[in-house]
Image (spheres, rainbow, N blue to C red):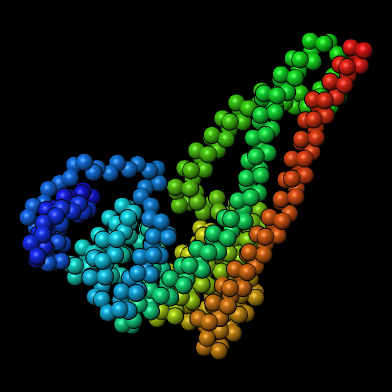
Amino acid sequence: MPYFTCRLASAEGRTFSQTVLAGSHDECRRRFEDDGLCVLSVRRDWKKIEIRFSLFGKKVKQRDFLMFNQELMALIKAGYPILRGMEIIVGRVKSLPFKEVLMDVEKSVRGGKALSEAFAVHEAQFGTVYTASLMAGERSGNLAGAVGRYLTYAKTVSRTKSRIRSALTYPTLLILFAGGLLTILINFILPRFSDFYLDFEAKLPAVTRGLMSVAGFLRGLAPYLLGLALVLAVVFVWARNRAEGRVRIDRLLLRIPWARTLLIESGVSLFSRTLGLLLEAGISLVQAIGIARHAVPNRYLVRRTAACQDRIKNGQTLSDTLAETQFFPPLALDMIRIGESSANLEGMLAEVADFYDARTRSRIDTLVSLIEPVIIILMGLVAAAMLLAVYLPIFNIIQVAQ
């Protein structure tokens, strides 16, 4: 979307220039005229050309999106019309990709579409849950309340994901550091010491000979390992970009003993929280379950829930329907069954989500607490082996010299 430089005049007769992002000359002119300004001229600003390239396309940051919804909810509660609120927010957004999306939404709303319809075009970035929440808020006449419920949901999900990422950061850094240290020692330090020891024609200790043999073997194998890693990476990316390939990869992940439990429990948590949000917003159970099933990160588990809508339409209860997917834990099914019988399904789904969120955090914390000492011990053993391999020959050389 291009930039335009506009020369404007206020009602007091003051003239000034302002550069804005707009779809066309007419759109730029109309925007300032709606603010009560006289547009003297509009010209394209060729100095500001955004050149952006990304292998993954334009991304909207979660933080910017949540801030937009926070501001939109505040403006709606203050009595601002939706279109005017969008105009105010768009003028303050700094992120260019997000600004372009919001300008397209504003243009659609100005053309007579509902806010949910305008955002439906961008579901790939914001998700079906968001557009469904907006639609429910528009139907009930409480859009601000619907946006507020979505904000609570999105912040909870984002906080959980952020906690998982931060918990795994430290062990990942330790593993990378240990790998880098080994690479430096094997490729640079040991070969120099080997040449130095050979000059003295001294017999090297068994630790040094073994470590140097391993280092030579790894150096010879390195090109093949790098080639294999590159091939596997290309195959992985190709498979992830295909629907069937992604399902197969996610199914393989479920065969890892510890990962299976973590993936299932986190999927149950996200499904329950999303379904509870949609039901609370007034979406019917049949429609809500069709949306909530896509909140599960594992595509294979999503496929297992494909028949849930039809089963609900045929009169099955939600708990019986989820039981037939064969991955919901018995405790979650019992809690949902209690929610159905007590007419408090939304509240019980929130309890299920909170319970499995806590279990997921506990499992991750336990894993991290186990991984950290193991990695530290392994790094200590590697460092000790390196020191022995380097210093034992020095003592032998000293004895030979004496």
The quadrant holding residue 251 is bottom right
For residue 32, say whether it is visible: yes
Where's the C terminus, which quadrant? top right
The one nearer the camera, 292 or 360, is: 360
Using residue 7 as the reference point, say whether residue 246 is left or right of it.
right
Residue 202 position, x and y percent, is 86, 13
What residue sits 51% from the left and 54% below the top?
247
Residue 299 position, x and y percent, is 51, 58
What residue sits 67% from the left and 25% below the top?
187
Judged from this view, the residue extending furthest toward the bottom is 342
Question: In this rendering, is residue 61 above or below 134?
Answer: above
The one nearer the camera, 216 or 341, is: 216
Question: In this rendering, is residue 385 above or below 172?
Answer: above
Using residue 333 as the reference point, say whether residue 315 is left or right of it.
left
The quadrant holding residue 393 is top right
The quadrant holding residue 79 is bottom left
The one nearer the camera, 31 or 102, is: 31
Residue 396 position, x and y percent, is 88, 19
What residue sits 15% from the left and 66% below the top?
35
For residue 301, say whether it is visible: no
The one nearer the camera, 327 or 313, is: 327
